[in-house]
Amino acid sequence: MEDMARPVLHDDSLKERLLDTTADLVHRMGPARVTLREVAAEAGTSTTAVYSLFGGKSQLLTAVVDNGFRSFGDAQRSASGGGLRGLGLAYREWALEHPTLYRLMFGGTLAAYVDCSPTPAVASDAMAPLIEAVTSAQNAGAIRDLPTETVAVAIWGQVHGLVSLQLAELGAPGTDWDAFYSEAIDAIARGWA
């Protein structure tokens, strides 16, 4: 008699749906009010599936944040051919396409309610394209020869601040964010030349 394969009960599609649903619920309701029962119901599955795939609430929220950093890192790697400017533009584009994940990844709100922070290796991997671009620019003499990580974190902070202001809608009324951001990216580059 042939061994019969066990049916897949919880596939990658369900896992992705649970991650997306959780991010959306946390954004709408806040992390303290989201329960695994609500996540399961909204995703059209059972709490057993959530526990089976993730463990508990802390692990699920960590997976949401890690998933965000993976997606962000993929976008950064795709833009790496454009150098520092390309990475800066891709940073903003990703944040505008994924504002909920962006806020969860960088807002720190989850850690206040549950033991949840990004997995260090996942977050670090997402920033690797920036480190590589800074190293390349330094080797070409295009930016100052300071410690690479210092320059990378400073540039990241500048770009992050601009994007966070836009997402929080804190610009002057009628701000043309496309033009403003493009000019600011150029100014950042000049500042590090």
Image: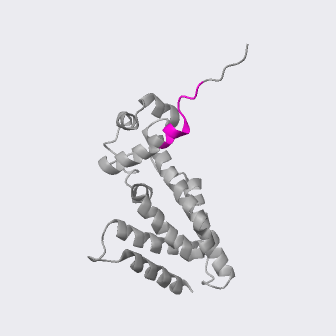
Image quarter of residue 6: top right
Tag count in the figure? 0
Image quarter of residue 147: bottom right
Depth check, front residue: 22 or 32: 22
Q: Residue 75: percent from the left, percent from the top?
A: 55, 62
Quadrant location, the N terminus: top right
User: Looking at the image, which residue is at 45% across and 48% down?
Assistant: 116
Q: Residue 136: percent from the left, percent from the top?
A: 66, 76
Outermost residue toward the right in this view: 1
Q: Residue 20: percent from the left, percent from the top?
A: 43, 46
On the question of residue 118 being in view, the answer is no
Q: Residue 106: percent from the left, percent from the top?
A: 43, 60
User: Looking at the image, which residue is at 46% across and 42% down?
Assistant: 17
Does the magenta portion include 58? no
Quadrant location, the C terminus: bottom right
Q: Is residue 65 left or right of residue 171?
A: right
On the question of residue 163 being in view, the answer is yes
Residue extent of the magenta highlight: 7-16
Does the magenta portion include 9? yes
User: Looking at the image, which residue is at 46% across and 68% down?
Assistant: 92
Above or below 43: residue 69: below
Above or below 190: residue 42: above
Outermost residue toward the top in this view: 1
Depth check, front residue: 110 or 100: 100
How was the colour assigned to the protein in this rendering? Answer: one colour
Above or below 94: residue 174: below
